[in-house]
Structure formats: C-alpha cells, structure tokens
Image (cartoon, helix red, strand yellow):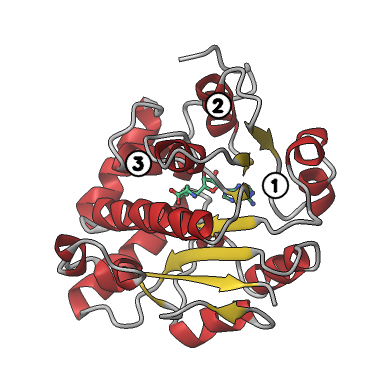
Amino acid sequence: MPALPATVDTTQPSAARAYDYFLGGSHNFAADREFANQVLAIAPSIPAVTRLNRSFLRRAVHYCLDQGIRQFLDLGSGIPTVGNTHQVADAAGIAARVVYVDNEPVAYHHAQHVLGGSETATIIQADMRDLPAVLDHPDTRRLLDFTQPVGLLAVGVLLYLEDPQPAELLGAYRQRLAPGSLVAVSTLTDEHASPELRAEMELLRGAYESAGEPVYPRDHAEILRWFDGLDLIDPGLVTLPEWHPQDQVELDDPAKPLGYGAVARVP
Ligand code: SAM
C-alpha cells in the first residue's frame, strides 16, 4: 500500500473503502471493516449487489468498446479492484484511454499506485459535480478528445446524490459529449424489493446516514428522468443482471431487485 497523505483520516469509515471490503479488496482500514461488518449484519445482500454492479460495469464497458468507443470518463470509479474499465479494455485487447475520477483520497492514491506510469489511464481526485475540475484537468485534456464519442460511466455513484443532482449532473456532462457518446448508469433501488429486502434497505440507509454518507434508492420512473434527451439502448433501464445478461446465476440472485442499470446514446 503506498504512503497515504497525513490528511486521510483512517479512523473514520468511508463508503468507498467499505465497498472495497464488500468486493473482497484489501484497501480498507479497521474503521471501514467495522462499519462494513455493521452493514453486513443488517443488510447481508449488499456484497451481492456490489458484485452485480461490478459485473454490469464490465458488460457496459464491453458494449461501449463494441460500439467503437475508445475513451472513457469513469465518474466515482472507486478503489481499483479487478475489472476496472482500463482492465476490461486491456483484456479485450483494445487500446482505450481512461480518466478515472474519485473524490475519496484513498481511492485516488491506490488508483495512482495501480495505474503506475500508464500513459493511457489516469485518475484525478475531484468531486464529479465540479465539471471544470474534471473536464479542464490537464490529464482529462491530454487523454480525452470531446469532439469524438466518449463513454461516460456513472456506475454505482449517483446513489450518493440527492435529487435533483443526478439529473443535473448527467445533463451538464451530456452538453460536453459528442453525438454517439454512450452514458452508462447504475444505481440502487428498492422498488420491487421483497419486504425483507426493503427492510434491509431501510437499515442500510440509516447506517450510511449515521456514517455521514447518505444513500438514496430510487424507483424506475425517477431514474428514467436522468436520461432525458438521451436514447436508451435496449433493453432500457432494467435490473443489473438483466442488462445484456450473461449469467444465469446472476439472474437468479435474490439481490437482483436492488439495482437498476442502463446505457444510453447521445443523439
Ligand atoms: N464505479 C465503481 C463501481 O461501480 O464499481 C465504484 C463505485 S463505489 C460504490 C462509489 C465511488 O464513488 C466511491 O469510490 C466514492 O468515493 C465515489 N464518489 C462518491 N461521491 C463522489 C463525488 N461526488 N465525486 C467523485 N466521486 C464520488
């Protein structure tokens, strides 16, 4: 693990590092594990949702690559674990340029370490809501050409934003994207959850709120509004494993109703 800046308070849990723990990663501290274990006790479906989400990310990136996208802006990219956007492209033997964005210092430092001296993938530490900080960053300018289609990823991150921020954010980025760009989004929902799953979600919300990182599950109609002005790719906004499904085990996962995902094209 690379040395962290002294400003990182590892005694406070972070949602980004708890997510890493749920995925089986090692970039987390005692406070994160304690928090994550509290979440697990009240919402045991969460690791399954995080895996379904990662799997959606991989399929969405593959779709973008198949459509000829060769550059990605990955918002709220998280702590690097296996299956990051540049690794998906590498594994497919495709040269792609990737700018990761995360505001969490540990995610930033680990990503820097993992990416090493890569000339085609980088991470910038910024709040994704600060468009100038993201889009005018020298690395963004160096790696991404906004006159050409870009894959904009907001996967597993808009759940941290209160309405109307997700729609405004996507709308603002969309203004900068060339026609043919693709926007991939996944987020948390409890719309069709069983009473048991819904109860888990309520407890989960309370835990994240107490930790100072509230999360906002949404229903289908609310999320669809985020895609105003974009053309949804078939099959539209569906539960995570139903988006270009590949795995029957995922389709049968009891946590399936807790996440929606979609990819849309900039007309
Ligand atoms: N996108 C990855 C995935 O789907 O596997 C990681 C998702 S993780 C649940 C969410 C990440 O978003 C965390 O690393 C968190 O630090 C980051 N994040 C949350 N709010 C953010 C913001 N306003 N700007 C940038 N990153 C943010």
Q: Residue drawn at (52%, 58%), measured in percent from left and top?
A: 64
Is ligand 1 within 8 Å of the beta carbon of the residue shown at mark 1?
yes
Distance from the alpha carbon under mark 3 to that under mark 2: 15 Å
Instruction: Give left or right: position of 5 versus 144.
Output: left
The amino acid marked with disc number 1 is Asp
Q: Is residue 117 above or below residue 199?
A: above
Q: Do callouts 3 and 1 mark residues in contact (Cβ within 8 Å)?
A: no
Q: In x, y percent, where is residue 93?
A: 45, 38
Q: Quadrant of residue 48?
A: bottom left
Q: Looking at the image, which residue is at 77% across and 66% down?
A: 172
**For numbered disc 3, what is the local secondary structure?**
helix
| Amino acid marked by disc 2 | Asp
* Classed neighbour count for the residue bearing mark 3: other residues with Cα under 10 Å, few (<14), some (14–19), many (≥20): many
Q: Which of marks 3 and 2 is nearer the N terminus?
A: 2
Camera-nearest residue between 115 and 210: 115
Q: Residue furthest bottom?
A: 221
Question: Residue 97, how many percent across, how many down?
Answer: 63, 39
